[in-house]
Amino acid sequence: MSAHPRLSLNQATIKYANLTDALQTTTAAGIASIGLWREPVADVGLDAAARMVADSGLRVSSLCRGGFFTPMHGAARDAALDDNRRAIDETAALAAAGAPGSRAVLVLVAGGLPEGSRDLIGARERVRDAVGALEADAASAGVTLAIEPLHPMYAADRAVISTLGQALDIAEQFNSTAQFNSTAQFGPTVGVVVDTFHIWWDPQVLEQIARAGRTGRIASYQVCDWITPLPADVLLGRGMMGDGHIDFASITDAVVQAGYTGDVEVEIFNEQIWDAPFDQVAARVVSSFAEHVALPVT
Amino acid sequence: MSAHPRLSLNQATIKYANLTDALQTTTAAGIASIGLWREPVADVGLDAAARMVADSGLRVSSLCRGGFFTPMHGAARDAALDDNRRAIDETAALAAAGAPGSRAVLVLVAGGLPEGSRDLIGARERVRDAVGALEADAASAGVTLAIEPLHPMYAADRAVISTLGQALDIAEQFNSTAQFNSTAQFGPTVGVVVDTFHIWWDPQVLEQIARAGRTGRIASYQVCDWITPLPADVLLGRGMMGDGHIDFASITDAVVQAGYTGDVEVEIFNEQIWDAPFDQVAARVVSSFAEHVALPVT
C-alpha cells in the first residue's frame, strides 16, 4: 500500500528511533513528511540534523515542542522564553532544510499548574502573555506558533489549555503574519493544533474547527485514536487509528472544509507501539491512515 | 470540629459500608445529610431502607444513580427505561423518608458509546431522548432528574455528556416542574449536577454555573479534588478536598451566587479512602470540607 501523499509520521510514534533511523524509516515506508522533536535533533546537533533532513528529501511538518509557560516568573520565566526562542530558530532551520511544502510550525504545550498553585485562570493568562512575548520573534523567523489544546485530563499537570475554543481565544488576539511554509505562503503567526486525541470528545469540536478555518488558524492536524481502558500512565493512552473510539471521518471532513491543506501527522504515544519494530509501525501507520482518517487524495 | 450544616456524605465515599453503617457513620460524625446509592439500598430492600433513613433523622440529598441510556434500542432500551423508572420511585420514597430539607434528586450518568460505535453525536441524542421519555414519570413522582456531566476522559466508556454546558443544553429543553424537596418548593424536573472533579478544568465553568442558576437547574453540588498523578484506574482518581489542584472557593462562590441552597455532597472514589475506617473518613470529610470548600454558614 502506498502512503497518502499528505501523511506525515510524527517522530514520537517511533520514539526510540534516533534521527537517522526516523528519517530512514519514514522514507522507506514511502511517507513524504516527518514531524520532528527537539530532543533527537539536539542529539545530533541542529546543523547536522538540518543536513540529514535535506538529504532525506522529506518535508518537515512541525517541530515538537515549545511551551511550558505557566510556571514562569522572573529568571525562570526569562529562561523559558529563551528556550522557546531557540525552538523558534530550530523550527525555521529544519523547515528550510525540508523539501518544498515543509512548514515552520512550532507546537506549543501550555504547561500545567505551578507546584502548589490552584490558580487555573492565572496560569492561562500567563500562557497568553508568553505567546505575546514570543510573537515578534516567531514572525521575524517565519515560524507559526501552534497552541495545542491538550485533553482536560492533563489540565493540572501538563497543559492548562484544554479546548480548541480556548486555544483560539488566545490565538485570535495575535494578528501578525509569518511566512507560512517554504513555498512562501503566509499565514497568522499564532495558530492552533487540531489533535483528534485531545478534542474528539468536545461537543463544540466541529464548530471550533470551522471557526479556526475562518481565520486560517489551523497550523497542524494530528491524528491518533482514543483507546479504552486507559493505561496506567494516561500519557500513553493513544492508539493506532481504528483501534479506538474516534470518528475520524467527521473531524477530517471539518478540517478539510476549514481549508487546511498541510500534512497530517500521526502522533501516537503508546508503549506497545514504541516497542514494535520501526518499519512495522510505519507500515501500520500507512494502512491505518488510509483506512480510517478519510483524507481525500487531491 | 462540628460539621457544616449543609454537608452531605455521599455513600460512595465509604463504599464498603452497608446502609446501616453508612447511616450510623454519618450521624456519629455530626453530618446532617447523606447521598444514597441504589445498590446498598437494594441490599436491604427499599421499604426497610426508607425506615432506616427515617429512623436516622438524616436528610437525603440525592440517589445515585440512573442513566446509562446510550446503548438503548428495542427491548434493551425499554428495560433500561424501566430500570430508571424504578430508580425514580426509589428516589421519591427515600427523600420522603428523610428529614425535612431532603431532596428527591436522581443523579443520571449518561452512558458511553455502545460497543463498536463511534457515533458520539447519535449517542448524545439518545440521552436527550431518554430524558424526554422519563420526564413525565419524574414530574409526577416529584423527582428531579439530575444530568451529571462526567469528565471528558470518560466520554468513550461511561458518559457521553462531558460539560456542564452540554448538560444544560439538554436540561433546558424540558420545562416541567417537580416538587423540588420535601418542604414543598418546586423546581424544574430536569436539572444538572455540578461536580468539581468533572468540570473544574472547563474554561466556561463559572459562566455555565451562572447559566444553570438563572433557570434554577442546579440539582446537586458535589465536591472532591483532582489529584495527580492519576491512579491506574482513572475511575478512582478522586481525592479529599485539599489533596489536589481544584480551587473550590471560586466554584463554590459561583454555585452560591447561582442560588443553590441545597446540601453539598462529598463524593470520593479512592481506594485508599475506601480502605480506611469509616469514622476516620467521615472526620476527614468534615474537616476538609470546612477548610477548603468555602461554603458560607448561613
Image (tube, coloured by chain):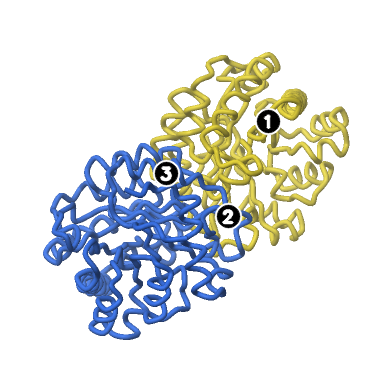
Chain colours: A yellow, B blue
* Crowding near the residue tagged with mark 3, few <14, some 14–19, many ≥20 C-alpha atoms within 10 Å: many
Q: With A164 as the anchor, is B159 left or right in this view? A: left
Earlier-in-chain disc, 2 versus 3? 2
Say the numbered circle drawn on residue A72: 1
Residue type pointed to by label 2: Asp
Say the numbered circle drawn on residue A188: none
Residue at image x 43%, y 55%? B223
| CA distance for labels 2 and 1 | 23 Å
Q: With A87 as the anchor, is B94 left or right in this view? A: left
Of residues A195 and A9, the one nearer the viewer is A195
Of residues B286 and A39, the one nearer the viewer is B286
Badge 3 element: helix
Image quadrant where residue A122 sits: top right
Badge 1 element: loop
Instruction: Please say if B218 is above or below B276.
Output: above
User: Given contact means CB atoms under 8 Å apart, are the residues at marks 2 and 1 in contact?
Assistant: no
| CA distance for labels 2 and 3 | 17 Å
Place of residue B237 in the rendered image (x, y in percent of width and height, measured from the top left):
55, 61
Residue type pointed to by label 3: Ile
Q: Chain of mark 3?
A: B
Say the numbered circle drawn on residue B243: 2
Image quadrant where residue B102 sits: bottom left
Whether residue A234 appears in this view of the structure is: yes
Instruction: Please say if B107 is above or below A212.
Output: below
| CA distance for labels 1 and 3 | 25 Å
Say the numbered circle drawn on residue B251: 3
Q: Nearer the viewer, mark 2 or mark 1?
A: 2
Q: Nearer the viewer, mark 1 or mark 3?
A: 3
Of residues A13 and A146, the one nearer the viewer is A146
Of residues A173 and B28, the one nearer the viewer is B28
Badge 2 element: loop
